[in-house]
Image (tube, helix red, strand yellow):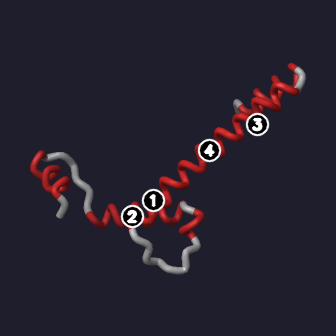
Amino acid sequence: MSSRRSRSRQSGTSRITDDQINDLVSKLQQLLPELRNSRSDKVSAAKVLQETCSYIRNLHREVDDLSERLSELLETTDAAQAAIIRNLLMQ
C-alpha cells in the first residue's frame, strides 16, 4: 500500500479502494479514442493516464484553434450575421 493511502487512513479522511481506482481507469480508457478500440484489454493505468493528459491537451488546442477561427469569421461578417452567430452559440 502506498504511503499516501496509509496517511489518508490515519488522518481519517475518505479513501478510495484499488477496485475503485481500477474502475475509474477503465472508464477513462473507454473515453479515449486511442485506447477505446484497443485490441488488448490490458493497458496499464500509467498509459491510460498519459493518454488522458495528451487527449485533454489536444482538446484544449482544438478549442483554442476553433475559437480563433470563429473570431476571424466574426470579424469578416457584417454585424447582423455576427449577432445571429453569437446568438446561436449561446443556445
Amino acid, disc 2: Ala
State whether residue 10 is above or below residue 76: below
Q: CA distance from mark 3 to mark 1?
A: 29 Å
Name which residue lies at 54% across and 60% down: 31
Name which residue lies at 52% across and 55% down: 54
Q: Residue 59 at what x, y percent from top left?
A: 60, 48
Q: CA distance from mark 4 to mark 1?
A: 17 Å
The disc placed on residue 69 is 3
- Quickly name the residue at label 1: 50
The kind of secondary structure element at disc 3 is: helix
Amino acid, disc 3: Arg
Q: Earlier in the sequence, mark 4 or mark 2?
A: 2
Amino acid, disc 1: Gln
Quarter of image, res 89: top right
Query: Farthest top residue?
Result: 79
The disc placed on residue 18 is none
Name which residue lies at 48% across and 53% down: 53
- Quickly name the residue at label 4: 61
Q: Are marks 1 and 2 in contact (CB under 8 Å)?
A: yes
The kind of secondary structure element at disc 4 is: helix
